[in-house]
Image (spheres, rainbow, N blue to C red):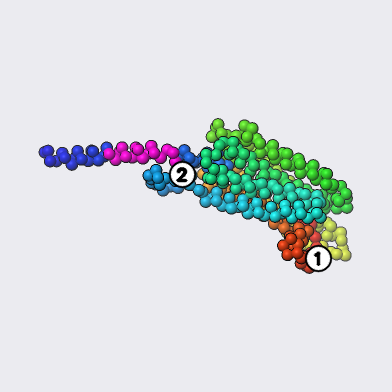
Amino acid sequence: MRTRSLPMEAFIAMTLSLTATTASGLNSSSPLDSSTPSWSWWGLSEEASNFSSEPTVQMSPELRPAGPEVSPWDVVLCVTGTLISCENALVIAVLFYTPTLRGPTFILIGSLAVADLLAGLGLILNFVFTYLADGSPEPVGLLSAGLLLSAFSASVLNILAITVDRYLSLYNALTYHTERTLTFTYVMVLIIWLSCVMLGLLPALGWNCLRDETACSICRPVTKSNAVALAVAFLLVFGLMMQLYLQICKIAFRHAQQIAVQQQFVVISTTKGVSTLSAILCAFGACWLPFAMYSIVADSSYPAVYTYAAALPATCCSVINPVIYAFRNPDIQKSLWMACCGCVPSNLSLRPRASSDV
């Protein structure tokens, strides 16, 4: 009987040893958990278990990573922000160093480029504050969120201002250049930026969810109610843009019918302009509508991957804005050709101006 009890005693001793080892391993993993950022703009306060179902492997302290695991989505957003910054910096440089590009239309293009440039820098800074800065304080997170909120809001409002400018250039074609003064344009741009700066300061002024995590939206630290209000405001802006572009198409076709001598040329030019305007509106809606609709129905409890999937197309809107509103403009194209090779292609100066040209 004594010889049979020896294996049982050895088993009990081994079990107690494994239990103590596991408990010490769990206690030593707490510093890794506490290093995960909780203020990221994209709501990365979720634990790693929401992104992967693989079992956790215990590591020794010397092999344990010093910071949070880098998300591929954040890398893509950082690269997108870099591309946005480079594109819009080029647009700003061309407008700044070309004295002839000082009209009201080009002021609006420059304001849009500044907004998109700040949006790109905000995406880069958000990545830096999340992964590269050591123990980023809460005010830095609020600053990053406020910069992104102000920049993207200014981008959308500047696109609306450019749409209004296009409509007025056709609706009041005879008196447009006399009524559309630089002072009026500067005042409109100033109002846009003051409104967006105040909007970006709201999280830092207390309109945030830092004290109540359940009230957070998909973009922390913006609250759910504020995110819904912003999404509804965007839907109103998009509806106004659709109405303005519809009126632009009607005016363009009416002008084509009134000019019988040049009917063939005008019909071709107008048809091309209408198709271009439709593509612009569809691209704007495809970029921002998914994010706006998702902001209304979702909150911080939803998986972060859905937020990334909706936010990435919205950021891509700032990538295509320079192509649509700046690089397609013949005057800006001439300045780019002069800056790059010191010459202008002969076919560029003969290109007719359509109603879709900014």
Q: Quadrant of the C terminus?
A: bottom right
Q: Secondary structure at mark 2?
A: loop
The residue carrying pointer 1 sits among few (fewer than 14), some (14 to 19) or many (20 or more) residues within 10 Å by Cα, namely few
Image location of residue 50, percent across then percent down: 47, 44
Marks 1 and 2 in Cβ contact (< 8 Å): no
Residue at 67%, 38% (x, y): give it.
Answer: 199
User: Which numbered circle lies on residue 350?
Assistant: 1
Query: In front: 185, or 25?
Result: 25
Disc 1 versus disc 2: nearer the observer: 2
Image location of residue 197, percent across then percent down: 69, 39
Q: Amino acid at mark 1?
A: Leu
Whichever of labels 1 and 2 marks the residue nearer the N terminus, that label is: 2
Residue at 58%, 44% (x, y): give it.
Answer: 126
Residue at 72%, 58% (x, y): give it.
Answer: 327
Query: In front: 262, or 306?
Result: 306
The residue carrying pointer 2 sits among few (fewer than 14), some (14 to 19) or many (20 or more) residues within 10 Å by Cα, namely few
Q: Secondary structure at mark 1?
A: loop
Residue at 14%, 41% (x, y): give it.
Answer: 4
Provide the residue designation for mark 2. 66
Residue 159 appears in the picture as rendered: no
The residues colored magenta run 17-32
Q: Amino acid at mark 2?
A: Ala
Q: Quadrant of the N terminus?
A: top left
Distance from the alpha carbon under mark 1 to that under mark 2? 60 Å
Residue 200 is left or right of residue 346, and the answer is left
